[in-house]
Image (tube, rainbow, N blue to C red):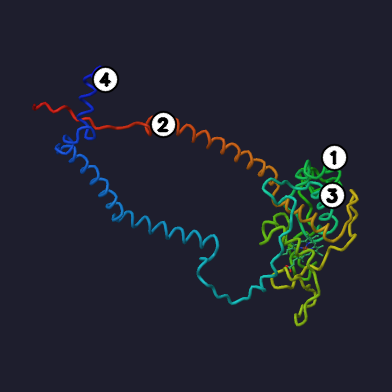
Amino acid sequence: MLSRQLSPGALRKAASLPAFGSKNALRSPRALAVRNASTASSSTAFESFLNSRITLVSVSLFTAGSVAWYTHLYGSLPFLAQVHASHASDEGLHPPQYPWSHKGVLDTFDHASIRRGYQVYREVCAACHSLDRIAWRNLVGVSHTVDEVKAMAEEVEYQDGPDDAGEMFMRPGKLADYMPPPYANEEAARAGNMGALPPDLSLIVKARHGGADYIFALLTGYVDAPAGVEIREGMNYNPFFPGGAIGMARVLFDGLVEYEDGTPATTSQMAKDVVTFLNWASEPEHDERKKNGIKAVILFSALTLISLYVKRFKWTPIKNRKILYDPPADKTH
Ligand code: HEC
């Protein structure tokens, strides 16, 4: 019955496999030798990998590199205690974290707030602080229309030239001009502020630890100096400023500006708007960056899924095959 269903060749082949003919398997020295050879060679390869100098050197280099990289990023290792000559409070009070409307990974700037913030910068901060890296044209499409920006630029006189006669002349501002500085040079700025230099605000949000939170806390954080703290003449107490004594006095007071959109101009509202504006000035690419980030995540996750599928597809025949050792038939009997 069996012989009728299977070909004689199939039966012979099956009989020669160790599982089918156990006598054969035990007696065949070749099969044993093959198995030993394969197990022995893989374990020595693993052992020699563990014992090799190259492995030792590369693991040590990797460890040293990780430590160097971490200390470069964070200044110290987390498990080493440090002793400082200064106290943490010398660095200023740490600002609270505020719920900025552009904080989340999917959030863009509140552009109405940028527009109000520009107004606060222009009417208050621009008296002392420059904004060197922002040109009028940068505001177009962000907070103002092109006609509004042109009109604002034309109100400012810029020096240009030389003309045909070699003379410098003054002309109204154009879109390509940069924001006019309040002082001609650093000396004039210091002379106007009792020796303190009002820093340029273009990149200030990126230039200070705590970023937007710090500047908001600084602008709204002016309080009377606590008992026992001496503040020199001309300095002001602000717990968020490192050292506590800052050359800039409190500048924002309720109702200082009048917003065209009717928003009540409280101190914190103005501070929030001007910080949003300064945050935009530091990161004009912010909205576009997050948009591109989302595109990249969508694109790369789709590509990852496709490549996982293709990998499984290509490997299926290899992973599903069964390898049998089929020695040539013994011809001695
Ligand atoms: C009357 C002049 C004046 C005005 C107006 C003014 N500042 Fe200042 N600001 C200064 C001076 C001076 C300093 C430097 C203080 C110091 O180094 O002690 C300063 C410093 C700063 C700093 C840097 C603080 C730091 O950590 O180093 C920021 C941020 C700042 N001002 C923001 C503003 C903003 C925003 C406005 C508008 C709402 C404004 N300032 C208006 C004079 C002014």
Viewer-side label of 3, 4: 4
Residue 156, numbered label = 3
Viewer-side label of 2, 3: 2
Query: Please, what is the three-letter code of the amino acid marked with disc 1?
Result: Asp
Cα separation between marks 3 and 1: 15 Å
Judged from this view, the residue extending furthest toward the front is: 1
Residue 147, numbered label = 1
- Mark 1 or mark 2, which is nearer the start of the sequence? 1
263 up-or-down from 216: above or below = above
Query: Please, what is the three-letter code of the amino acid marked with disc 3?
Result: Val
Q: Which residue is mark 4?
A: 6
Cα separation between marks 2 and 1: 64 Å
At horizontal 72% and vertical 63% (from top left) the residue drawn is: 96
| Image quarter (top left, top right, bottom left or bottom right) of the C terminus | top left
At horizontal 42% and vertical 60% (from top left) the residue drawn is: 64
At horizontal 23% and vertical 19% (from top left) the residue drawn is: 3
Q: Position of residue 280 (x, y in %)?
A: 73, 50
Q: Which residue is mark 2?
A: 316
Q: Position of residue 8 (x, y in %)?
A: 21, 19
| Image quarter (top left, top right, bottom left or bottom right) of the N terminus | top left
Task: Say which element carries label 2.
Answer: helix
Residue closer to the observer: 13 or 131: 13
Q: Position of residue 233 (x, y in %)?
A: 80, 77
Task: Say which element carries label 1.
Answer: helix
